[in-house]
Image (cartoon, helix red, strand yellow):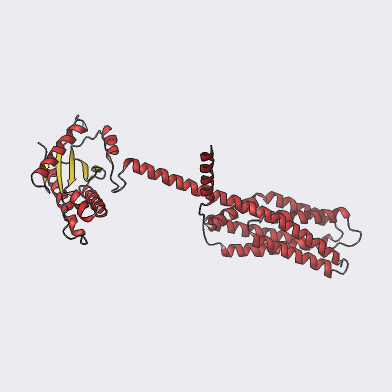
Amino acid sequence: MRIDQEADGELAGAITRIPVDSYEIDREAVIAMLERERRSFTASLIALSMMALAVAMLPDAILMAPLLGLRFASFLFTRAAAARLEQHVRARLPYKISRRVLFCSMSLTGVTLALLLWPQPTGASLVAVALLQVVVVVVVTLISVTLAALPASRDGMLISFWATACALVLFHPASADPAMVAVVTMAVAGIRIYSSSTGQHIRSSARTLVENRRLSEDLADALAHAEFLSWRDPLTGLFNRRMLFEETRMENSAHSRHLLTIDLDRFKTINDTFGHGVGDRVLIATADAIREWCAALGGAGSHIAYRLGGEEFLVIARGLDDAEIAEAAEDLRALIAGLQDRFTEQPGIRISASIGFSAWLFGEVLDDALIRADIACYEAKKTGRNRVRRAA
Protein backbone atom coordinates (compact mmCIF):
# COMPACT_ATOMS: atom_id res chain seq x y z
CA MET A 1 0.00 0.00 0.00
CA ARG A 2 2.83 2.37 0.89
CA ILE A 3 4.56 1.70 -2.44
CA ASP A 4 1.32 2.36 -4.32
CA GLN A 5 0.84 5.64 -2.46
CA GLU A 6 4.39 6.73 -3.21
CA ALA A 7 3.93 5.84 -6.88
CA ASP A 8 0.68 7.81 -7.00
CA GLY A 9 2.45 10.74 -5.39
CA GLU A 10 5.25 10.61 -7.90
CA LEU A 11 2.72 10.45 -10.75
CA ALA A 12 0.82 13.41 -9.36
CA GLY A 13 4.06 15.33 -8.98
CA ALA A 14 5.01 14.54 -12.55
CA ILE A 15 1.64 15.78 -13.78
CA THR A 16 1.94 19.06 -11.88
CA ARG A 17 5.39 19.57 -13.37
CA ILE A 18 4.20 19.26 -16.97
CA PRO A 19 5.77 22.18 -18.87
CA VAL A 20 3.05 24.20 -20.57
CA ASP A 21 3.22 27.27 -22.76
CA SER A 22 1.97 30.38 -20.94
CA TYR A 23 0.61 31.61 -24.27
CA GLU A 24 -1.67 28.56 -24.46
CA ILE A 25 -2.93 29.21 -20.93
CA ASP A 26 -3.66 32.86 -21.76
CA ARG A 27 -5.33 31.82 -24.98
CA GLU A 28 -7.63 29.28 -23.32
CA ALA A 29 -8.48 31.72 -20.53
CA VAL A 30 -9.37 34.44 -23.03
CA ILE A 31 -11.47 32.02 -25.10
CA ALA A 32 -13.36 30.93 -21.98
CA MET A 33 -13.94 34.57 -21.04
CA LEU A 34 -15.14 35.53 -24.51
CA GLU A 35 -17.53 32.58 -24.61
CA ARG A 36 -19.02 33.73 -21.30
CA GLU A 37 -19.26 37.27 -22.66
CA ARG A 38 -21.07 36.01 -25.76
CA ARG A 39 -23.53 33.98 -23.66
CA SER A 40 -24.28 37.06 -21.55
CA PHE A 41 -25.81 38.89 -24.52
CA THR A 42 -29.38 38.27 -23.38
CA ALA A 43 -28.60 39.41 -19.83
CA SER A 44 -26.99 42.57 -21.24
CA LEU A 45 -30.11 43.36 -23.24
CA ILE A 46 -32.27 42.87 -20.16
CA ALA A 47 -30.01 45.22 -18.20
CA LEU A 48 -30.25 47.85 -20.94
CA SER A 49 -34.03 47.49 -20.96
CA MET A 50 -34.20 47.96 -17.20
CA MET A 51 -31.98 51.04 -17.47
CA ALA A 52 -34.29 52.45 -20.16
CA LEU A 53 -37.33 51.76 -17.95
CA ALA A 54 -35.72 53.51 -14.99
CA VAL A 55 -34.71 56.51 -17.12
CA ALA A 56 -38.26 56.76 -18.50
CA MET A 57 -39.56 57.01 -14.92
CA LEU A 58 -37.25 59.92 -14.03
CA PRO A 59 -38.45 63.55 -14.22
CA ASP A 60 -35.46 64.58 -16.40
CA ALA A 61 -35.74 61.60 -18.74
CA ILE A 62 -34.97 63.80 -21.77
CA LEU A 63 -31.68 64.91 -20.24
CA MET A 64 -30.78 61.30 -19.26
CA ALA A 65 -31.63 59.89 -22.70
CA PRO A 66 -28.27 60.92 -24.27
CA LEU A 67 -26.43 59.17 -21.41
CA LEU A 68 -28.49 56.05 -22.05
CA GLY A 69 -27.72 56.32 -25.76
CA LEU A 70 -24.03 56.66 -24.97
CA ARG A 71 -24.26 53.53 -22.85
CA PHE A 72 -25.91 51.65 -25.71
CA ALA A 73 -23.20 52.79 -28.15
CA SER A 74 -20.55 51.66 -25.67
CA PHE A 75 -22.28 48.28 -25.43
CA LEU A 76 -22.14 47.82 -29.22
CA PHE A 77 -18.50 48.93 -29.32
CA THR A 78 -17.61 46.40 -26.63
CA ARG A 79 -19.42 43.57 -28.40
CA ALA A 80 -17.57 44.32 -31.65
CA ALA A 81 -14.20 44.55 -29.87
CA ALA A 82 -14.82 41.25 -28.05
CA ALA A 83 -15.87 39.50 -31.27
CA ARG A 84 -12.72 40.71 -33.07
CA LEU A 85 -10.53 39.60 -30.19
CA GLU A 86 -12.15 36.15 -30.18
CA GLN A 87 -11.62 35.82 -33.92
CA HIS A 88 -7.91 36.60 -33.58
CA VAL A 89 -7.40 34.37 -30.55
CA ARG A 90 -9.09 31.34 -32.11
CA ALA A 91 -7.13 31.80 -35.34
CA ARG A 92 -3.89 32.15 -33.33
CA LEU A 93 -3.28 35.55 -34.85
CA PRO A 94 -1.48 38.33 -32.96
CA TYR A 95 -4.08 39.92 -30.72
CA LYS A 96 -2.19 42.63 -28.88
CA ILE A 97 -3.97 45.42 -30.76
CA SER A 98 -7.35 43.71 -30.30
CA ARG A 99 -6.75 43.61 -26.55
CA ARG A 100 -5.96 47.31 -26.57
CA VAL A 101 -9.17 48.04 -28.46
CA LEU A 102 -11.11 46.01 -25.92
CA PHE A 103 -9.35 47.90 -23.11
CA CYS A 104 -10.49 51.21 -24.63
CA SER A 105 -14.05 49.96 -25.07
CA MET A 106 -14.19 48.74 -21.48
CA SER A 107 -12.79 52.04 -20.17
CA LEU A 108 -15.58 53.78 -22.08
CA THR A 109 -18.04 51.29 -20.59
CA GLY A 110 -16.95 52.31 -17.08
CA VAL A 111 -17.51 55.96 -17.91
CA THR A 112 -20.97 55.43 -19.45
CA LEU A 113 -22.14 53.29 -16.52
CA ALA A 114 -20.98 55.86 -13.97
CA LEU A 115 -22.72 58.69 -15.88
CA LEU A 116 -26.03 56.88 -15.42
CA LEU A 117 -25.60 57.55 -11.70
CA TRP A 118 -26.04 61.27 -12.43
CA PRO A 119 -27.65 62.78 -9.30
CA GLN A 120 -31.39 63.24 -9.69
CA PRO A 121 -33.33 66.27 -8.47
CA THR A 122 -35.38 66.17 -5.30
CA GLY A 123 -38.71 64.55 -5.95
CA ALA A 124 -37.45 61.98 -8.42
CA SER A 125 -39.04 58.57 -8.13
CA LEU A 126 -37.21 56.61 -5.45
CA VAL A 127 -38.05 53.38 -7.26
CA ALA A 128 -36.58 54.64 -10.54
CA VAL A 129 -33.41 55.95 -8.89
CA ALA A 130 -32.92 52.76 -6.87
CA LEU A 131 -33.60 50.58 -9.93
CA LEU A 132 -31.06 52.50 -12.01
CA GLN A 133 -28.40 52.39 -9.31
CA VAL A 134 -28.89 48.69 -8.58
CA VAL A 135 -28.77 47.77 -12.27
CA VAL A 136 -25.58 49.80 -12.74
CA VAL A 137 -23.86 48.12 -9.77
CA VAL A 138 -24.98 44.66 -10.94
CA VAL A 139 -23.77 45.33 -14.50
CA VAL A 140 -20.39 46.55 -13.24
CA THR A 141 -20.05 43.39 -11.14
CA LEU A 142 -21.07 41.06 -13.96
CA ILE A 143 -18.72 42.71 -16.44
CA SER A 144 -15.85 42.52 -13.95
CA VAL A 145 -16.45 38.82 -13.41
CA THR A 146 -16.80 38.19 -17.14
CA LEU A 147 -13.55 40.05 -17.85
CA ALA A 148 -11.68 38.33 -15.03
CA ALA A 149 -9.35 36.62 -17.51
CA LEU A 150 -8.34 40.02 -18.92
CA PRO A 151 -7.34 41.96 -15.80
CA ALA A 152 -6.13 45.01 -17.72
CA SER A 153 -9.50 45.55 -19.43
CA ARG A 154 -11.38 44.79 -16.22
CA ASP A 155 -9.30 47.21 -14.18
CA GLY A 156 -9.58 49.84 -16.91
CA MET A 157 -13.36 49.61 -16.66
CA LEU A 158 -13.35 49.73 -12.85
CA ILE A 159 -10.95 52.66 -12.67
CA SER A 160 -12.87 54.69 -15.24
CA PHE A 161 -16.12 53.88 -13.41
CA TRP A 162 -14.61 54.87 -10.06
CA ALA A 163 -13.08 58.09 -11.36
CA THR A 164 -16.28 59.19 -13.13
CA ALA A 165 -18.50 58.32 -10.15
CA CYS A 166 -16.18 60.18 -7.76
CA ALA A 167 -16.18 63.20 -10.06
CA LEU A 168 -19.99 63.24 -10.03
CA VAL A 169 -19.99 63.06 -6.24
CA LEU A 170 -17.38 65.77 -5.70
CA PHE A 171 -18.19 68.27 -8.43
CA HIS A 172 -21.96 68.03 -8.87
CA PRO A 173 -23.34 71.10 -6.98
CA ALA A 174 -26.43 69.30 -5.76
CA SER A 175 -24.76 66.22 -4.31
CA ALA A 176 -21.23 67.07 -3.15
CA ASP A 177 -20.66 64.56 -0.37
CA PRO A 178 -17.05 63.39 0.19
CA ALA A 179 -18.30 60.46 2.26
CA MET A 180 -19.82 58.96 -0.88
CA VAL A 181 -16.32 58.73 -2.39
CA ALA A 182 -15.42 56.23 0.32
CA VAL A 183 -18.59 54.25 -0.41
CA VAL A 184 -17.84 54.12 -4.14
CA THR A 185 -14.22 53.19 -3.44
CA MET A 186 -15.17 50.33 -1.15
CA ALA A 187 -17.76 49.07 -3.63
CA VAL A 188 -15.26 49.09 -6.50
CA ALA A 189 -12.58 47.46 -4.34
CA GLY A 190 -15.00 44.70 -3.32
CA ILE A 191 -15.95 44.04 -6.93
CA ARG A 192 -12.26 43.99 -7.87
CA ILE A 193 -11.40 41.43 -5.18
CA TYR A 194 -14.35 39.20 -6.07
CA SER A 195 -13.59 39.26 -9.80
CA SER A 196 -9.90 38.62 -9.12
CA SER A 197 -10.67 35.30 -7.43
CA THR A 198 -12.84 34.41 -10.41
CA GLY A 199 -9.96 35.25 -12.73
CA GLN A 200 -7.65 32.93 -10.82
CA HIS A 201 -10.22 30.16 -11.13
CA ILE A 202 -10.52 30.74 -14.90
CA ARG A 203 -6.75 30.63 -15.35
CA SER A 204 -6.51 27.53 -13.20
CA SER A 205 -9.15 25.82 -15.34
CA ALA A 206 -7.34 26.96 -18.48
CA ARG A 207 -4.06 25.54 -17.18
CA THR A 208 -5.75 22.23 -16.39
CA LEU A 209 -7.24 22.14 -19.88
CA VAL A 210 -3.85 22.83 -21.50
CA GLU A 211 -2.14 20.21 -19.32
CA ASN A 212 -4.81 17.61 -20.12
CA ARG A 213 -4.46 18.38 -23.81
CA ARG A 214 -0.69 18.04 -23.52
CA LEU A 215 -1.11 14.71 -21.72
CA SER A 216 -3.50 13.51 -24.43
CA GLU A 217 -1.04 14.51 -27.15
CA ASP A 218 1.84 12.82 -25.32
CA LEU A 219 -0.27 9.70 -24.86
CA ALA A 220 -1.24 9.69 -28.54
CA ASP A 221 2.42 10.07 -29.50
CA ALA A 222 3.40 7.25 -27.15
CA LEU A 223 0.71 4.98 -28.57
CA ALA A 224 1.75 5.83 -32.12
CA HIS A 225 5.37 5.15 -31.21
CA ALA A 226 4.42 1.84 -29.60
CA GLU A 227 2.42 0.93 -32.69
CA PHE A 228 5.39 1.86 -34.86
CA LEU A 229 7.77 -0.27 -32.80
CA SER A 230 5.39 -3.21 -32.83
CA TRP A 231 5.70 -3.49 -36.61
CA ARG A 232 9.04 -1.88 -37.38
CA ASP A 233 12.68 -2.23 -36.48
CA PRO A 234 13.56 0.72 -34.21
CA LEU A 235 17.06 1.20 -35.67
CA THR A 236 16.39 1.12 -39.40
CA GLY A 237 12.67 1.79 -39.62
CA LEU A 238 12.16 -1.25 -41.84
CA PHE A 239 9.38 -3.71 -41.09
CA ASN A 240 10.34 -6.37 -38.55
CA ARG A 241 9.93 -10.13 -38.47
CA ARG A 242 6.53 -9.88 -36.78
CA MET A 243 5.22 -7.72 -39.61
CA LEU A 244 6.67 -10.15 -42.15
CA PHE A 245 4.60 -13.07 -40.96
CA GLU A 246 1.52 -10.91 -40.33
CA GLU A 247 1.64 -9.56 -43.88
CA THR A 248 2.43 -12.84 -45.57
CA ARG A 249 -0.28 -14.63 -43.59
CA MET A 250 -2.77 -12.61 -45.64
CA GLU A 251 -0.73 -12.65 -48.87
CA ASN A 252 -3.03 -12.77 -51.91
CA SER A 253 -1.00 -11.04 -54.61
CA ALA A 254 -1.71 -12.07 -58.19
CA HIS A 255 1.80 -11.04 -59.30
CA SER A 256 4.90 -13.16 -59.44
CA ARG A 257 6.84 -13.01 -56.19
CA HIS A 258 10.48 -13.37 -55.20
CA LEU A 259 12.24 -13.39 -51.85
CA LEU A 260 15.68 -11.80 -51.54
CA THR A 261 17.72 -12.64 -48.46
CA ILE A 262 20.43 -10.04 -47.85
CA ASP A 263 23.22 -10.69 -45.35
CA LEU A 264 26.03 -8.20 -44.74
CA ASP A 265 29.46 -9.76 -45.09
CA ARG A 266 31.80 -9.89 -42.09
CA PHE A 267 29.60 -7.51 -40.12
CA LYS A 268 31.07 -8.72 -36.81
CA THR A 269 34.47 -7.53 -38.03
CA ILE A 270 33.03 -4.05 -38.59
CA ASN A 271 31.66 -3.99 -35.06
CA ASP A 272 34.89 -5.32 -33.53
CA THR A 273 37.15 -2.98 -35.51
CA PHE A 274 35.20 0.26 -35.65
CA GLY A 275 32.71 -0.10 -32.80
CA HIS A 276 29.02 -0.78 -32.57
CA GLY A 277 28.18 2.86 -33.31
CA VAL A 278 29.70 2.54 -36.76
CA GLY A 279 28.03 -0.85 -37.11
CA ASP A 280 24.65 0.76 -36.45
CA ARG A 281 25.38 3.41 -39.06
CA VAL A 282 26.21 0.67 -41.57
CA LEU A 283 22.89 -1.04 -40.84
CA ILE A 284 20.99 2.22 -41.27
CA ALA A 285 22.81 3.00 -44.52
CA THR A 286 22.05 -0.49 -45.79
CA ALA A 287 18.37 -0.12 -44.94
CA ASP A 288 18.28 3.23 -46.75
CA ALA A 289 19.94 1.64 -49.77
CA ILE A 290 17.36 -1.16 -49.80
CA ARG A 291 14.53 1.36 -49.58
CA GLU A 292 16.05 3.35 -52.43
CA TRP A 293 16.36 0.18 -54.48
CA CYS A 294 12.73 -0.83 -53.82
CA ALA A 295 11.55 2.63 -54.91
CA ALA A 296 13.65 2.45 -58.09
CA LEU A 297 11.99 -0.85 -59.06
CA GLY A 298 8.67 0.96 -59.42
CA GLY A 299 5.24 -0.33 -58.51
CA ALA A 300 4.73 1.76 -55.37
CA GLY A 301 4.22 -0.51 -52.38
CA SER A 302 4.81 -3.68 -54.37
CA HIS A 303 8.26 -4.33 -52.92
CA ILE A 304 8.55 -4.50 -49.14
CA ALA A 305 11.76 -4.64 -47.09
CA TYR A 306 12.23 -6.18 -43.66
CA ARG A 307 15.05 -6.44 -41.14
CA LEU A 308 15.00 -9.97 -39.77
CA GLY A 309 17.59 -9.28 -37.09
CA GLY A 310 21.28 -8.47 -36.80
CA GLU A 311 22.71 -7.91 -40.27
CA GLU A 312 20.01 -9.92 -42.06
CA PHE A 313 17.46 -8.28 -44.34
CA LEU A 314 14.69 -9.58 -46.55
CA VAL A 315 12.82 -8.11 -49.51
CA ILE A 316 9.61 -9.40 -51.03
CA ALA A 317 9.58 -8.22 -54.65
CA ARG A 318 6.47 -8.54 -56.79
CA GLY A 319 5.77 -8.33 -60.49
CA LEU A 320 9.26 -9.25 -61.79
CA ASP A 321 10.31 -12.32 -63.76
CA ASP A 322 13.43 -14.35 -62.97
CA ALA A 323 15.68 -12.38 -65.33
CA GLU A 324 14.50 -9.03 -64.03
CA ILE A 325 14.90 -9.98 -60.38
CA ALA A 326 18.40 -11.37 -61.06
CA GLU A 327 19.46 -8.08 -62.66
CA ALA A 328 17.81 -6.05 -59.89
CA ALA A 329 19.51 -8.15 -57.19
CA GLU A 330 22.87 -7.47 -58.80
CA ASP A 331 22.09 -3.74 -58.76
CA LEU A 332 21.28 -3.97 -55.06
CA ARG A 333 24.53 -5.80 -54.35
CA ALA A 334 26.49 -3.05 -56.12
CA LEU A 335 24.52 -0.35 -54.30
CA ILE A 336 25.39 -1.84 -50.90
CA ALA A 337 29.02 -2.35 -51.88
CA GLY A 338 29.25 1.33 -52.73
CA LEU A 339 28.22 2.37 -49.22
CA GLN A 340 31.78 2.11 -47.95
CA ASP A 341 32.65 5.25 -49.92
CA ARG A 342 30.44 7.21 -47.50
CA PHE A 343 32.46 6.14 -44.46
CA THR A 344 35.51 8.28 -45.12
CA GLU A 345 36.25 8.60 -41.42
CA GLN A 346 36.69 4.82 -41.15
CA PRO A 347 39.55 4.05 -43.58
CA GLY A 348 39.78 0.41 -44.50
CA ILE A 349 36.13 -0.39 -43.80
CA ARG A 350 34.68 -2.97 -46.15
CA ILE A 351 30.94 -3.14 -46.73
CA SER A 352 29.33 -5.74 -48.93
CA ALA A 353 26.43 -8.14 -48.90
CA SER A 354 25.67 -11.63 -50.07
CA ILE A 355 22.23 -11.99 -51.64
CA GLY A 356 20.21 -15.11 -52.30
CA PHE A 357 16.87 -15.02 -54.06
CA SER A 358 14.14 -17.49 -54.73
CA ALA A 359 10.75 -17.50 -56.39
CA TRP A 360 7.84 -17.68 -53.99
CA LEU A 361 5.47 -20.02 -55.74
CA PHE A 362 1.72 -19.65 -55.57
CA GLY A 363 0.17 -21.87 -52.94
CA GLU A 364 3.55 -22.21 -51.22
CA VAL A 365 4.02 -21.25 -47.58
CA LEU A 366 6.51 -18.48 -46.86
CA ASP A 367 8.87 -20.70 -44.86
CA ASP A 368 9.58 -22.98 -47.80
CA ALA A 369 10.51 -20.10 -50.10
CA LEU A 370 12.50 -18.45 -47.32
CA ILE A 371 14.53 -21.61 -46.74
CA ARG A 372 15.50 -21.71 -50.42
CA ALA A 373 16.50 -18.03 -50.39
CA ASP A 374 18.57 -18.60 -47.24
CA ILE A 375 20.36 -21.54 -48.86
CA ALA A 376 21.13 -19.39 -51.91
CA CYS A 377 22.47 -16.64 -49.63
CA TYR A 378 24.66 -19.20 -47.86
CA GLU A 379 25.99 -20.32 -51.23
CA ALA A 380 26.84 -16.70 -52.08
CA LYS A 381 28.85 -16.42 -48.88
CA LYS A 382 30.45 -19.80 -49.33
CA THR A 383 31.66 -18.99 -52.85
CA GLY A 384 33.36 -15.71 -51.92
CA ARG A 385 30.76 -13.22 -50.57
CA ASN A 386 29.64 -9.96 -52.21
CA ARG A 387 27.69 -11.80 -54.86
CA VAL A 388 24.20 -12.90 -55.82
CA ARG A 389 22.97 -16.48 -56.04
CA ARG A 390 19.68 -17.85 -57.28
CA ALA A 391 18.04 -20.74 -55.46
CA ALA A 392 18.04 -24.02 -57.27
- Between 67 and 392, the one lying in front of the other is 392
> On the picture, is 78 further left or further right than 224?
right
Q: Quadrant of residue 275?
A: bottom left
Residue lying farthest top?
Answer: 363
Q: Residue furthest right?
A: 123
Q: Is residue 242 toward the left or the right of residue 219 in the image?
A: left
Q: How many marks?
A: 0
Residue 204 pos. (x, y %): 60, 51
Residue drawn at (81%, 66%), measured in percent from left and top?
Answer: 168
| Residue 112 or residue 25, whichever sits in front | 25
The C terminus - image quarter? top left
Taking the view exactly as shown, the residue that stands out farthest to the front is 2
Res 282 visible: yes
Viewed as shown, does residue 113 lie left or right of 306?
right
Q: Position of residue 352 (x, y in %)?
A: 15, 51
- The answer to whether residue 56 is left or right of residue 373 is right
The image shows residue 379 at horizontal and vertical percentages of 10, 41
Relative image position of residue 298 (x, y in whole percent): 22, 47
Is residue 360 in view?
A: no
- The residue at 27%/54% (across/down) is 277
